[in-house]
Image (cartoon, rainbow, N blue to C red):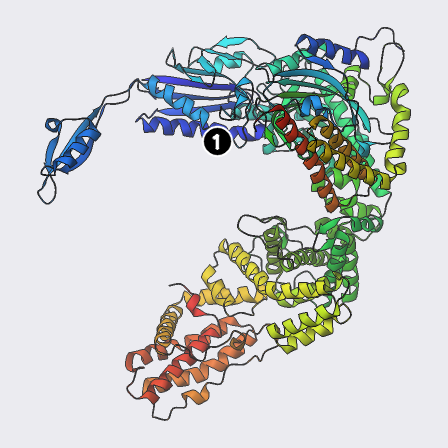
Amino acid sequence: MTDFLLELLCEEIPARMQIKASEDLARLFSEKLAEAGLKPDSIQSFVTPRRLALIARGLPLQTEAVNEELKGPRADAPPQALAGFLGKTGLTREQLVERPDAKGNAILFAIIEKPGRATADVLAEAIPAIVRAFPWPKSMRWGAASQTTEGLRWVRPLQGIVAILGEDLVDIEVEGVRSGFATRGHRFHHPDPITIGGANDYVEKLRACHVIVDHAERMALIEAKAQEAATARGLTLVEDKGLVAENAGLTEWPVPLLGDFDPDFLEVPPEVIQLTLRTNQKYFVLRDASGKLAPAFICTANIDAIDGGAAIVAGNRKVLAARLSDARFFWEQDKKTRLEDHAKKLERITFHEKLGTVADKVERVAKLARWLVEEGIVKSSPTTQTVTPAEAGVSSEGASTPEMPAYAGMTKSELADMAEQAARLCKADLVTEMVGEFPELQGIMGGYYARAEGLPDAVADAIRDHYKPVGQGDDVPTAPVTVAVSLADKLDTLVGFFASDEKPTGSKDPYALRRSANGVIATLTTLQLRLRLQSLILVATEQLAEQRTEAIDSAALDVAIEAMSNLLGPKAADRMRQRLKDVESPTAYGLWFSYYSSEHSLLDFFADRLKVQQREAGVRHDLIDAVFALGGEDDLVRLLARVKALQAFVETPDGTNLLAGYKRAANILKKEAPSPTAVTPAQAGVSGDGALPNEMPAHAGMTATAYTPEPAEAALIAALDAAEPRATAAIASEDFAAAMAALATLREPIDAFFESVTVNDADPDKRAARLALLTRMRDAVHGVADFSRIEG
Amino acid sequence: MAAKPDTLSFQDLILTLHAYWSKQGCVILQPYDMEVGAGTFHPATTLRALGPKPWNAAYVQPSRRPTDGRYGENPNRLQHYYQYQVIMKPSPPDLQDLYLNSLREIGIDPLLHDIRFVEDDWESPTLGAWGLGWEVWCDGMEVTQFTYFQQMGGYDCKPVAGELTYGLERLAMYIQGVDSVYDLRFNDAGVTYGDVFLENEKQMSKWNFEIADTEKLFRWFKDAEAECQASIAADVPLAAYDQAIKASHVFNLLQARGVISVQERASYMGRVRDMAKGSCEAWMKTNGWAA
């Protein structure tokens, strides 16, 4: 048994790639060894900015000899088959062994002895293969070898290979880089070659040459020393694991150093200072005893400087001061202009070719935010029902309803005014200098600027938070003005891009529409806001159509109206003609067309996102499908309530049995009566826009039989007569548990019916009547959900 | 003024780098006599990065960034500044060491100052070029862009060239310890950077932002584009490339005048890229190099 050391020395590896590279090296190495039948006791891998290294312990010097058996033809096979097998194995007939198979036929086998190989040889083959095929996210060519594009690619130029098995060199050459015992220490402290003995002295020898090879050790060191420096000044270090890891990826010998900056800079919002320190300079941020940002930073140097770091701190202070001066300049410049004046410049920024400028978008969002308030969807008290987020299937800290004195006694029209005002200003910070410099501060800066010019807190908060929630787990806004602007912004984006046929496909979602839809769903379900998505889509599309108008060609208009009439019926065409008589533009019609084709896909999109989001809350996706399949249900809160009642029901014995009875009925109907009176979604009592009658089909006449029904048949008719109105009424009052209870009464009659009644009776009247009865039963169930979508 | 300063003046910084890179076998060139946005645009880099012939050169290149003009009021931003550019093809195996020694030459001791190679990949859409490398930090300040060119004008670089771009004013400010670029000692005879360039920044900012006649600029762009295509057709790629540079600068001026919308911007950049790539293609062709 022996140990193996591998080091691949190269020019500085990007910090963000190091951990993955180190894991990849260990994985590829153990795979290559396993192919040769070698398994070391342990593999430890290391990474620094300049080297990837690995130590494998407990390796045998040889791989084990193995006998490989190859199955050949039958002993009595024709000579050609035998000759072929002998040719393939390189053996003679005498060397083959005969063994009987299960049927007793003699089969020839070749036993090939594979002698053990020297581990050094296995390594000499494996290492170059690993290097050549290393999965760097980005790699490059360099130097004289880059005369062709065929040569070695590495993350940055590869400079050396150390490969030592026990005490012996494993002789390797990869595209001109030859293995040896020598590597280099720290770039500045020990630039000359150092000789490594093997796995046992590697880590310590490099440490003596100012290189800590273990990434985790460097991280721990940075954290401890930074803490120490902070504590010595009575400050607290703001924890930032990502930044610790990044600094560990930028140093072989990390030396955290504390410096100060001019406290006058603290007048700039803390987010700006933090970003400047962290993103631009990779410095740690500190807080004072009161929790406020302290005018100090910690940078992580890569040397033990000969002056103890004074020059480094002085240099970094200077760089930081220049950056913070820029930031302060932006802050002061931006404040000189009111947000409403900044907002005027949004006319110059294209939001999307088909959707106009950002100013156009702001106009639509403002109207939509007002509409959400005026329609009573967003009210001045943050939540209207007592459903907790957990019940709604959404986890979010923002769900708790905070006290909101700002809203006490606010009327609907005041709220609407405020929502519109906030919406008109919500994108204004995009043209400020600060957001130009730090795009990630969009919203946040707008909030600061709004407060600085004395706008109400509710407006400033809405500007600040209207992008929320930006990802899973992010807070859902709860303040009414914020909710209105946030929903309006996201819904306008969704409607606009769907109407422009810019839907996400596969992994492509360039406008982050999935995130927008998730945000809408999280907000609606957490706050239990009752919004009919279809009516919103209609309003948002109308706005878009009215705004995106161009010169009218009346002939084109007539053509469009006729086409629309053919497609959607005269009523839809009339309605459109009414809406657009002042607009009258082919562009507007284009949008209308795409709206009618997109409406469905946008709702489907919401359904998909809802399923993904609810899966984590333990809601069955087939049940969501079953409710969506009814069509027309576009109120997510109501939909989820229905799904939850359904889930509770199908998990009871009544539910399971009713589902079985339903499936049996549905199967018979499918087989016996290919086109029964199918119930349309609207008839199922969940009509879309109230445009279609909300009533159950009249089946009574069909089940008033001309013959005397059998007892079980009569019982089912009676049960349906009783259950149907109960279920319908319960659904109308959104008491879905009661609707399920009504359906549950059908379970016994349907079981009894199948037990004693023959549907496929010789008498065609009876057969027809019984099929009609089953149809009625199925339709009654469909009043609640499309049970055919339910699994199990 | 202090007695004899112990740090390099702006011009001595340049002279020191010239002497150093000359010793490394570089051709010391003079700045290209056209307005460019960066040293990379100099044909000694762009065109010489193509093809198999070895090439080592160093030069100062004035860089014009009209939108960065601040009328001489910002101590760090200029619409005209200097880059020191080194290109070595093929990239030598010890390029990092050569570079670090150049820092030592100009008075930066890497055991006193924290020098770091921080990932920064370079891409120039207008040149159809990209490379991998770093920005070099000195005590947290970016002082040099270090790039291994992988593609130029859409062609693989065979072999790869190493490119170093020093920001001279920044470096000098750091070495001399001044906070404003205008306070830099240009020489050791009492002339400051401000003496030489402050008025220039004021007037050129005004021209770039306020005076430049946009109608003429649009026309110049079109003219340069036409001249570029004609030169490509006539197999004079060096002349064609000059026109591409010209168009690129005119485009930058149009940007500073704020007359190019977001959508138009992409289209103009595409036109400049087509000129640059067309010139590179013609250059490859007239030299008889295969892609």
Q: Which residue in the protein does label 1 denote? A: A135
The foreground one among A105 and A715 is: A105
Q: Residue at x 54, y 13 (%)?
A: A185
Task: Residue A78 in the image: state x and y as whole percent.
Answer: 12, 38
Task: Residue A514 in the image: state x and y as whole percent.
Answer: 59, 52
B21 vs B12, left or right, is: left
Residue A403 visible in this rendered orientation of the protein: no
A609 vs B140, left or right, is: left
Image quadrant of residue B15?
top right
The foreground one among B38 and A250 is: B38
Q: Quadrant of the C terminus of chain A?
A: bottom left
Q: Residue at x 30, y 27 (%)?
A: A37
A540 vs A710, left or right, is: right
Image quadrant of residue A280?
top right
Residue A735 visible in this rendered orientation of the protein: yes
Instruction: Say above or below: A479 vs A689.
Output: above
Q: Quadrant of the N terminus of chain A?
A: top left
Task: Residue A365 in the image: state x and y as whole percent.
Answer: 73, 58
